[in-house]
């Protein structure tokens, strides 16, 4: 936790609430953190009971005859492997409900451990080679690959475990997706006794930008043999992140990637594992950075990669700006000059990119001070006021009006109740948006106390869509670092949404009839995704957002009726998307909260 951030937050609380209420808030928050940890553990235990196969179901799996009876080669590099761990690994494979497998072992230990012999003799499907030298994790794995005779290759560490139904689920997926070349699954951790399972990682479906920011795939990774042959195995210059390197290279060669949203890998926690402490192998994160940089270069993408924030293994990718494209920042406004002034001053003072303009879209202001301010601010040649010609508030129509009055290459929708934090925000936005496959980019937005207001949008939360991680306290990280992880998302908020101007024309602009106020941003993003573009949440672009201070809340019968009408419009228009589920949100996560909680 960042102590400076926490100190600033406490100062804010004291100023706003007083000392006694601040102490109360701190006590409540500590209680919440401790209770949440306990609740997560309890929820996961309940999830396992409700979602994993019973003994009867395991017996049915053993009787299953698949049309395609693929042989799975489990590849394990060994080095001074603890005997207990190794025996548990072998036993977990012998217990598999799918039997067409082989275990390919290459041991780079200094001496052959005689205690391994009885374990190696437990099953005829075990292949073992003592290397007489340590070739490193990549070299040892490559030696194990030479023993492979299977159709698919699964990577397993020498101290980890697979549940009994793992290979069954892999082969089931292969039969359901005959073109598949790469499969990955969800995972959890085991601490001490193998029954002590914790920290489940329920992952999104394949997400290229998320992968570039963090090796979220890791375990379990399964490669078609032909794909592995094309890859040529592991490369020693990426030792520590050799799996990250080969996964990145695999995604460059195939689009036939399947995610199985089930816990099919148990990552063991012990003193030398990165599962226990993120700094156990610091060289691994440097190797990961190198792997991402090399991947981007192979893809012809001009970008630099750096460590992202304070979580090891999370990377920030910044794409170079090509040329000098013009940006129009569209800010709808009705009075509320104090907020607008703070917004504009932050942009004009901090922004490091030069070729931009601010288009204030005047929308039926009534106060004399507003128009006096407009006259003053337009003396700055970067600011222009254009007048929306109709009465009432129709956000979609106002934005469309602004886009049509812009001649810029890129357009940003921005609320007047925001304040900029990140000086090079436009460079970061443009870098992503210039990519041919990107349709829109969003930012990390904060409430006044610096807790999160927006970290991307998931479709299907509460039957509609919701900003993720709302009210996550400043300095506290979310589920697997999702607050500070660049990600592919289904949508981002229109409070700060950056896109090519041409995208508006391509998708038919924002929907002026069905989404005048609510859900227009989510609808716009889903239309963009329908065209095959990616939506990106970039947490390294930060703004304050004093949400709804200019428009107000749904607190009148008319506003409530309008919100309900637009909610129903959204449910009807995107019914199939909601029913299918957000691909960037795991089916095992709750649809009743926005905190990546485990589904009850």
Image: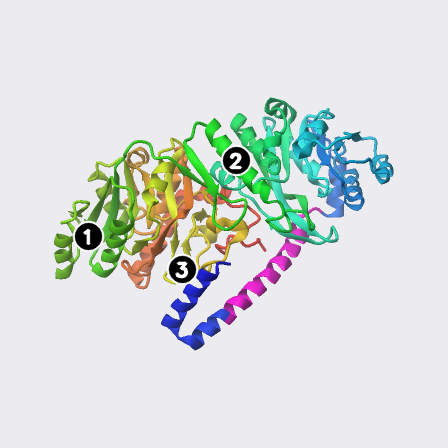
Which numbered disc, 2 or 1, marks the residue closer to the eye? 2
Residue in the foreground of this view, choosing between 357 and 507: 357
Residue to which mark 2 is pinned: 290
Q: CA distance from mark 1 to mark 3?
A: 29 Å
Part of the protein shown in magenta: 27-53
Q: Quadrant of the C terminus?
A: bottom right
Taking the image as shown, residue 123 lies to the left or right of residue 276, namely right
Tag 1 or tag 2, which sits nearer the N-term? 2
Residue in the foreground of this view, choosing between 142 and 190: 142
The local crowd at label 3, few if under 14, some if 14 to 19, many if 20 or more residues have their Cα within 10 Å, is: many
Q: Position of residue 317 (x, y in %)?
A: 44, 39
Q: CA distance from mark 3 to mark 2?
A: 33 Å
Give residue 363's mark: 1
Q: Residue at x 54, y 44 (%)?
A: 313
- Residue 534 visible to an observer of this rendering: yes
- How is the rendered protein coloured? rainbow
Residue to which mark 3 is pinned: 450
* Picture layout, residue 397 above or below residue 435: below
The local crowd at label 2, few if under 14, some if 14 to 19, many if 20 or more residues have their Cα within 10 Å, is: some
Which numbered disc, 3 or 2, marks the residue closer to the eye? 2
* Picture layout, residue 182 above or below residue 286: above
Q: CA distance from mark 2 to mark 1?
A: 50 Å
Count how many numbered circles sit on residues in the image.
3
Residue in the foreground of this view, choosing between 356 and 51: 356
| Residue 181 in which image quadrant | top right
Q: Position of residue 46 (x, y in %)?
A: 65, 56
């Amino acid at each position: 936790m960042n102590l400076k951030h926490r100190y600033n937050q406490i100062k804010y609380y004291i100023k706003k609430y007083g000392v006694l209420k601040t102490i109360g808030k701190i006590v409540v928050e500590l209680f919440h953190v401790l209770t949440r940890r306990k609740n997560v553990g309890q929820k996961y235990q309940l999830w396992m009971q409700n979602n994993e196969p019973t003994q009867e179901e395991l017996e049915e799996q053993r009787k299953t005859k698949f049309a395609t009876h693929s042989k799975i080669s489990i590849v394990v590099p060994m080095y001074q492997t603890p005997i207990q761990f190794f025996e548990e690994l072998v036993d977990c494979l012998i217990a598999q409900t799918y039997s067409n497998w082989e275990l390919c072992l290459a041991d780079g230990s200094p001496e052959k451990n005689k205690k391994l012999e009885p374990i190696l003799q437990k099953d005829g499907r075990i292949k073992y080679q003592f290397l007489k030298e340590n070739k490193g994790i990549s070299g040892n794995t490559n030696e194990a690959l030479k023993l492979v005779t299977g159709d698919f290759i699964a990577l397993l560490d020498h101290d980890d475990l697979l549940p009994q139904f793992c290979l069954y689920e892999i082969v089931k997926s292969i039969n359901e997706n005959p073109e598949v070349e790469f499969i990955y699954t969800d995972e959890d951790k085991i601490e001490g006794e193998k029954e002590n399972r914790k920290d489940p990682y329920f992952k999104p479906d394949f997400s290229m930008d998320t992968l570039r920011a963090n090796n979220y795939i890791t375990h379990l990774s399964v490669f078609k043999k032909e794909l592995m042959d094309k890859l040529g195995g592991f490369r020693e210059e990426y030792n520590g992140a050799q799996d990250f390197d080969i996964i990145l290279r695999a995604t460059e060669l195939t689009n036939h990637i399947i995610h199985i949203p089930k816990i099919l890998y148990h990552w063991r926690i012990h003193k030398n594992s990165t599962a226990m402490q993120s700094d156990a192998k610091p060289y691994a994160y440097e190797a990961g950075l190198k792997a991402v940089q090399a991947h981007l270069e192979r893809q012809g993408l001009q970008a630099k990669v750096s460590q992202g924030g304070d979580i090891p293994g999370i990377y920030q990718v910044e794409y170079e700006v090509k040329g000098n494209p013009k940006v129009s920042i569209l800010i709808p406004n009705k009075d509320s000059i104090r907020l607008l002034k703070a917004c504009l001053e932050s942009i004009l003072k901090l922004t490091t990119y030069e070729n931009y303009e601010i288009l204030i879209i005047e929308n039926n202001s009534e106060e004399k001070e507003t128009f006096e301010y407009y006259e003053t601010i337009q003396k700055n040649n970067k600011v222009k006021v254009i007048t929306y010609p109709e009465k009432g508030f129709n956000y979609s129509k106002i934005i469309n009006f602004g886009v049509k009055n812009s001649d810029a290459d890129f357009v940003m929708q921005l609320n007047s109740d925001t304040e900029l934090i990140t000086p090079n925000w436009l460079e970061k936005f443009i870098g992503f948006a210039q990519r041919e496959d990107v349709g829109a980019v969003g930012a990390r937005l904060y409430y006044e106390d610096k807790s999160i207001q927006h970290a991307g949008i998931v479709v299907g939360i509460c039957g509609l869509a919701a900003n993720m991680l709302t009210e996550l306290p400043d300095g506290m990280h979310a589920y697997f670092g999702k607050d500070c992880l660049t990600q592919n998302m289904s949508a981002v908020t229109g409070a700060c949404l950056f896109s090519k101007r041409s995208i508006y024309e391509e998708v038919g602009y924002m929907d002026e009839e069905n989404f005048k106020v609510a859900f227009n941003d989510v609808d716009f993003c889903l239309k963009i995704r329908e065209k095959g573009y990616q939506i990106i949440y970039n947490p390294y672009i930060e703004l304050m957002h004093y949400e709804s201070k200019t428009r107000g809340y749904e607190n009148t019968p008319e506003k409530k009726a309008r919100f309900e009408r637009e909610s129903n419009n959204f449910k009807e228009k995107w019914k199939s998307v909601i029913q299918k589920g957000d691909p960037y949100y795991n089916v095992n996560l709750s649809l009743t909260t926005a905190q990546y909680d485990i589904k009850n």
